[in-house]
Image: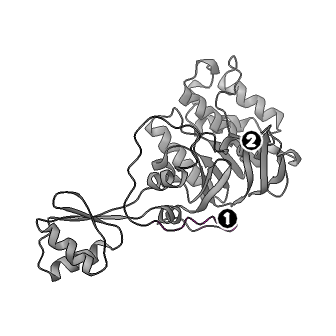
Amino acid sequence: MIEAVNLTKRYGDKVAVDHISFTVAPGTVTGFLGPNGAGKSTTMRMIMGLDKPTTGSIKVNGRPYRFLPAPLREVGALLDAKGLHGSRTARAHLTQLAVSNAIPTRRVDEVLELTGLTAVAKKRVKGFSLGMGQRLGMAAALLGDPQVLLFDEPVNGLDPEGVIWVRETCRRLAAEGRTVFISSHLMSEMAQTADHLLVIGRGRILTSGLVQDVIASATSDTVRVASPQAGDLARALAAQGIETAAPEPNILTATTAPAARIGEIAAANGIVLHELATQRASLEDAYLELTGNSVEYTTGQPARPQPTGPRRPQPVQPVPAGHGARRA
C-alpha cells in the first residue's frame, strides 16, 4: 500500500506537488494521469525516496522508503528506462542488482524470460532500443518479487505485443494482491489496464475513483439520431423536456435522455428514424475535460470542440483503501 498525506514539494518558488493526499490500495491497478508538468514524476520520485517532500509524508507499507529493510524485495520501480550502465549486459545489470539486494541469482533468468529478454541477455545495454530498455527496466522492477510496483510510462517505445504484455502483467500482479501504480499518457491503454484513477493537474488532485466513475463525473454520453423528420422530432423531444442540438441537416444529438427514451417518443409520434445510436464518452474525453485548465504547455492547435449537454460536478474522493471492484 502507498499512502500520501498532505504531500508537498517545492523547488524554489515553483510548487510541483501541492498538499495532495491519496491511498493506492493493494489488489488494484491505479492509473496516475496528468499533463506534462502536473507533478506525476515528482510524486513517484518522492515515493522512492529520490526527492524529499517539503512538507507532508508518503509511506510504502507503513514506512518511508528509506526505512525499508530490503527495498528491492518490497518495492519495484521503473522510473527511467535510460538509467542504465551502457557497457553492461542485460544479465550483468540484473545480476548486480540481485547480488546487492541478497536476491538469488536464479531470479535473473526468471525475469529475463518473463520480459522476453533471454535472447539478448548477453548484449550490452547501450545497443538496446527504447522498447528493449523498457523491458529491462520492468525486469529490474520485478527482480525482487515485490508487493508494490511503480511504473512511469512503461509502454514507451513498445510495439503492440509489448503494450499488451505490460497490460496483462499489471493486471496479473494486481490479481495476486500486489499494489500497482502506473502512469501513462495513453488513455485508451489506461482504460483497459487500470481499476482506479488518480488525476493530477498543476500539482493538485483533480479527481479520483473507479475508472467508470471518473468518466461519468466529467462527461456525458451523446445520443445521435438521424431522421428525415428531424424538425418534428426536435419539437416532440422539447415537449418532453429533452434538449437537442442539430450539428448537421437531419441529425440531432442529445445528452439528457437515453436512446431508448428518444426512440419511444419518435415511435409515439410516428417519426421515421434512420439512425439511433449512443456515443459513449471515453477516458480520453474525461481526461481532456478534467485537465483542460491544468495544461502547462499548450500548442497552437484549434480549441477542442466541447461536447453538448450539462456537466456533472467533478468530485475529489480519495482512492478507497480497501480492495476496489474491478470493471465488468
Residue 323 drawn in magenta: yes
Query: Disc 1 marks which amino acid?
Result: Pro
Lateral position of residue 110 relative to residue 211, left or right: right
Q: Residues within 10 Å of mark 2 (few under 14, many from 20)?
A: some
Q: Which stretch did the figure color magenta?
A: 311-324
Residue 73 visible within the image: no
Which of the image's four quarters has the N terminus?
bottom right
Mark sitting earlier along the chain (2/1): 2
Q: Position of residue 51 (x, y in %)?
A: 80, 40
Residue picked out by circle 2: 45
Lateral position of residue 272 relative to residue 63, left or right: left
Q: Nearer the viewer, residue 246 or 322?
A: 246
Q: Which element carries disc 2, helix, strand or loop?
A: helix
Query: Disc 2 marks which amino acid?
Result: Arg
Residue in the picture at 69% in, 16% down: 87
Lateral position of residue 183 relative to residue 278, left or right: right
Q: Position of residue 134 (x, y in %)?
A: 59, 33
Residue picked out by circle 1: 318
Q: How many marks?
A: 2
Q: Nearer the viewer, residue 230 or 288?
A: 230
Residue in the picture at 71% in, 27% down: 93
Q: Main secondary structure of the magenta part?
A: loop
Residue in the picture at 81% in, 33% down: 99
Q: Residues within 10 Å of mark 1 (few under 14, many from 20)?
A: some
Q: Name above or below for residue 78 compared with residue 25.
A: above
Residue 135, image quadrant: top right
